[in-house]
Image: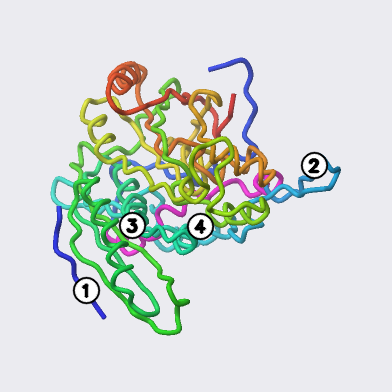
């Protein structure tokens, strides 16, 4: 069954990260940003955030880390892989796809159109849907869906034009579907793009009763001479972080394992906070489109990284030319309480947290020092919080200091 929807609208010493960026991080020039053959592989573009040096990754993430609790019981540190998500397998798939379609790997796929590029991105919301089913919160999950795609394409400086969704379920519950699509409409309004259409699929026996799946894609446009591609980034440039609302839409397989270990329920209060765990975890992903485009319009932005799967460790180096890395100032922003709870309840190592979650920063802008001063001044006097979270340095990978 198909349904179409109408258009709407710096510090003392540094500790090296346990993994470094792979030599295969993309270094685009305008001549190879896009070829027509890329277009059918847009669905793989964000997955490159999972690429990392295999040896150091295994040392950091696959070793069994045992911590003793107050009762001297051995508790194993939890990892994303333990929760069923194998980042290295995803990296291998991307490497294989790259052999067939050289040049993929940006946050969005670029297709030339006259003096502009069309920029496309596609995504879902992952196992955050499981929490939607458990909490009954369905009216914001559509915001997450839109956010994951439009936040990707805006990293190229593209203004989103339109969005399409795919909603699949076993038996169509019209009232529930309406709530989900309302969230999609809200997300489109926040990003100033049109909900152009969608597909509703009713597939008996394929999904459990009362459950559904979501995916979608967004298309935007940017002038060729205005595309944000990272090629002019140099050591000494500044990293500006835009705060997240929480976990956003990545790492929920690990979150759900932590929740099960903690013995708490989604209705229980997040320790030390006035909200429940369910409410904190279901907070919709921030849509950064308007804020980012406004900052870009004032000049000085050289690169943008959407902090999704792979966290800081994998995503920030993706926008750097080869030979450059990032120094992150660890205490330069407020880490939301939900991440502190996840780390404590799951006994999760810092390196694992930094590779799995956004840790309170959903978008990172690489800007000139001059632009950084202006942005920090203007945004802090406005309604948006921004943080100076680090700098670009010589050498590859990410260090935390």
Image spot of residue 31 (x, y percent): 28, 45
Location of residue 392 in the rendering, given as x and y in whole percent from the top left corner: 46, 26
Q: CA distance from mark 4 to mark 1?
A: 36 Å
- Whether residues under marks 2 and 3 lie with C-beta atoms below 8 angstroms apart, the answer is no
Residue 69 numbered mark, or none: 2
Q: Mark 2 or mark 3, which has the lower sequence index?
A: 2
Is the C-beta separation of discs 1 and 2 under 8 Å? Answer: no
Q: Which residue is drawn at the image coordinates 19% and 50% (left, top)?
A: 193
Around disc 2, counting alpha carbons within 10 Å, would you say few (fewer than 14), some (14 to 19), or many (20 or more)? few
Q: Quadrant of the N terminus?
A: bottom left
Front disc: 4 or 1: 1
- Residue range corresponding to the magenta coloring: 36-60
State yes or no: discs 4 and 1 in contact (Cβ < 8 Å). no
What residue do we see at 30% from left, 59% from top?
Answer: 217
Secondary structure beneath dot 1 equals loop
Q: CA distance from mark 2 to mark 3?
A: 39 Å
Q: Is residue 87 above or below residue 286?
A: below
The quadrant where residue 178 appears:
bottom left
Ranked by sequence position, the earlier of labels 4 and 3 is 4
Q: Secondary structure at mark 4?
A: helix
Q: Quadrant of residue 43?
A: bottom left
Tag on residue 139? 3
User: Residues at badges 4 and 3 in contact (C-beta under 8 Å)?
Assistant: no
Q: CA distance from mark 4 to mark 2?
A: 41 Å
Residue toward you, 232 or 391 = 391
Residue that label 1 marks: 3
SS at mark 3 in the image: loop
> Label 2 near label 4: C-beta < 8 Å?
no
């Amino acid at each position: 069954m198909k349904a179409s929807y109408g258009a709407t609208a710096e510090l003392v010493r540094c500790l090296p990260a346990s993994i470094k960026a792979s030599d295969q991080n993309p270094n685009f020039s305008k001549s190879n940003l896009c070829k027509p053959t890329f277009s059918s592989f847009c669905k793989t573009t964000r997955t490159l955030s999972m690429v990392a040096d295999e040896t150091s990754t295994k040392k950091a993430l696959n070793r069994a880390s045992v911590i003793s609790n107050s009762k001297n019981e051995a508790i194993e540190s939890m990892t994303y892989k333990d929760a069923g998500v194998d980042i290295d397998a995803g990296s291998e798939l991307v490497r294989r796809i790259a052999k067939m379609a050289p040049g993929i790997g940006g946050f969005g796929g670029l297709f030339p159109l006259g003096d502009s590029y069309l920029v496309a991105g596609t995504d879902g919301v992952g196992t955050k849907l499981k929490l939607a089913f458990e909490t009954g919160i369905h009216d914001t999950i559509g915001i997450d869906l839109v956010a994951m795609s439009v936040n990707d394409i805006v990293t190229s400086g593209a203004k989103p034009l339109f969005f399409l969704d795919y909603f699949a379920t076993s038996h169509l519950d019209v009232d529930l579907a309406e709530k989900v699509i309302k969230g999609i409409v809200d997300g489109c309004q926040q990003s100033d793009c049109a909900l152009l259409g969608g597909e509703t699929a009713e597939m008996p026996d394929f999904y459990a009763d009362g459950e559904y799946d979501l995916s979608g894609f967004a298309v935007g446009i940017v002038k060729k001479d205005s595309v944000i591609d990272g090629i002019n980034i140099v050591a000494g440039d500044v990293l500006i972080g835009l705060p997240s609302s929480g976990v956003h839409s990545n790492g929920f397989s690990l979150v759900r394992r932590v929740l099960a270990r903690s013995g708490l329920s989604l209705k229980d209060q997040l320790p030390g906070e006035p909200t429940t765990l369910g409410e904190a975890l279901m907070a919709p992903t921030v849509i950064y489109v308007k804020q980012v485009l406004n900052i870009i319009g004032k000049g000085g932005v050289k690169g943008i990284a959407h902090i999704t799967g792979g966290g800081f460790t994998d995503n920030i180096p993706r926008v750097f030319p080869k030979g450059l890395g990032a120094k992150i100032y660890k205490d330069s922003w407020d880490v939301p309480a939900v991440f502190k709870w996840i780390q404590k309840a799951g006994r999760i190592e810092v390196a694992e947290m930094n590779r799995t979650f956004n840790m309170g920063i959903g978008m990172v802008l690489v800007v000139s020092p001059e632009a950084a001063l202006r942005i920090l001044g203007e945004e802090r006097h406005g309604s948006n919080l921004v943080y100076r979270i680090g700098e670009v340095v010589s050498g590859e990978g990410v260090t935390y200091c």
